[in-house]
Image (spheres, rainbow, N blue to C red):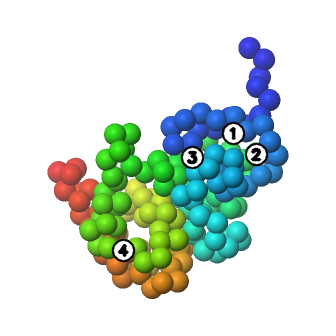
Amino acid sequence: VPPRNGIELRINGESYLHTGDPSMPLLWYLRDVLQLTGTKYGCDSTVCGACTVLIDGKRALACARSMDTLAGSEVTTVEGLAGPDGSLHALQQAWIDEDAILCGYCQPGWLMAAADLLRRKPAPSDADIDALPNLCRCGSQPRIRRAIHRAAAQLQAAKG
Ligand code: FES
């Protein structure tokens, strides 16, 4: 089989072949090509965290990763956080329960950064949460902090 001309990657469990500009940022590919607009365009300069996704399970900024660095990668966006049956991730449920959202623009980035934090630290401290490199200009950090603690407790309890 001849090699296909383009960059193959997986996004939220689906396979994609990018045949356009290899230097295109992942953020543009997600939003403009795939219409996966949950990942937000904030600063476009690695400062705000609004574009946070998971690449091979780890936190990454979609504005700072070009498509040519992603061959064979598995990308997860906020659209892929819920289970295949549509059941909400513990973080999404906790966000609702704690009413964590104000304007909402930064929240997909926070959710993905929190998912990465709970993978690394299943019982994070306030300081761990405050160290996440995400900005919220509405001031909902206290509620976000509570939501992450709530999700952490729920995931720990579910593990038994
Ligand atoms: Fe990527 Fe702000 S848009 S960090």
Q: Which mark is residue 68?
A: 2
Q: Which residue is mark 3?
A: 75
Q: Residues within 10 Å of mark 3 (few under 14, many from 20)?
A: many
Report if the CB atoms under discs 1 and 2 are less than 8 Å apart. Answer: yes
**First of labels 2, 3 by sequence position:** 2
Task: Tell me if I can see residue 58 in this picture.
Answer: no
| Disc 2 and disc 3 in contact, CB within 8 angstroms | no
Q: Is residue 140 above or below residue 150?
A: below
Badge 2 amino acid? Asp
Q: Residues within 10 Å of mark 1 (few under 14, many from 20)?
A: some
Image coords of residue 156 (percent x, y): 24, 57
x and y percentages locating residue 81 in the rendered image = 43, 51
Residue type beneath disc 3: Val
Q: How many marks?
A: 4
**Residue beneath label 1, please?**
71
> How far, Cα to Cα, is label 1 from label 2?
6 Å
Looking at the rendered image, the disc whose residue lies closer to the viewer, 1 or 4, is: 4
